[in-house]
Image (cartoon, grey):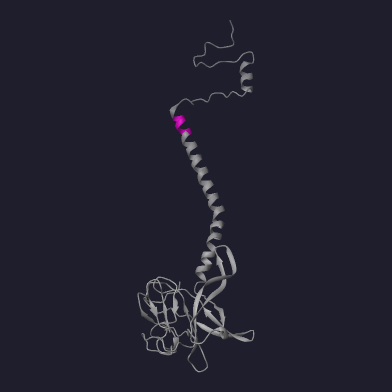
Amino acid sequence: MDNGLNDDDPGGARECSYGWCAASRRAGEAEPVAGADRPGFLRAGLRRRAFMGRLAALLHGIVALAAGAPVIAFMLDPQRRRSRGATAAPFIRVASLDALPSGRPVRVPVFAPRRDSFIQYPRARIGEVWLLRGGVANRSAGRGGDPAGQGGTGADGNDPGGNGADGATRNATGADGPPLVRAWQTLCPHLGCGIDYAPLRRQFACPCHTSAFAPDGSRLFGPSPRDMDALDVRITNAEGRPWVEVQYRQFRTGVADRVVV
């Protein structure tokens, strides 16, 4: 009986009759690939698939890196600009000269534009400074021996008239020479605690670790490694009256040298 198969084929291949094979191929049945059952063929296929998978992962990584590079640069840009402008401290107006009492230190806030990561604040409180107009008379005896607080030892311990080793004047001077206004950072050079003023003792004092400073900023006793950090001051005229402007800076704590941070 003719069943459409060739029984004499030694390879087991079948010939089609009655259109059966053609119908099967049209239905989507794939013809067997010669040699597909050999182990070498299977290993080669696996190697090709692994290579293509790794290549696709590499291409995806390159695309992701190219897309993320601008985002990373944008996020780091404020930090780079902050570090580039760290040494350019402008003078900031902090108080009217007429509002400062003579002979008594006054703590005043410092306001300036500030950028915090991606937020720009047009007027933010960035710190405080101590201002002293003239000097404090009859202060308690301490290092420097300057009863009027207007000469002798300055903020650096060996700085007559408040002039630093770099020659920059840290105090606004009057016409007769003595400092008209002095300014200091309110943070203790020891560990950065806030420095208060004790009017009865006529001393600056750190309440955290009992460091004490004379009215001229010189260190009297305590663990502070240096004198109070003096700031540059200038007097400008605006709106028909004199103003006190301070070059506000912060310094590294716990070291003997003044290092701007």
Q: Residue furthest top?
A: 1
**Residue 219 coordinates in the image, percent (x, y):** 38, 80
**Residue 215 coordinates in the image, percent (x, y):** 43, 83
Would you place residue 45 above or below residue 241 in this image? Answer: above
Identity of the residue drawn at 61% across and 20% down: 24
Identity of the residue drawn at 62% across and 16% down: 20
Residue 190 within the magenta-colored segment of the rendering: no
> Which image quarter is the C terminus in?
bottom left
* Apparent side of residue 138 relative to residue 127 in the rendered image (left or right): left
The overriding secondary structure of the stretch rendered in magenta is helix
- Using the image as rendered, state which of residue 85 and residue 23 is in the foreground: 85
> Which image quarter is the N terminus in?
top right
Would you place residue 90 above or below residue 6 in this image? Answer: below
Q: Residue furthest front?
A: 200
**Residue 115 coordinates in the image, percent (x, y):** 56, 67
Would you place residue 111 above or below residue 242 in this image? Answer: above
Q: Which residues are magenta?
A: 40-45
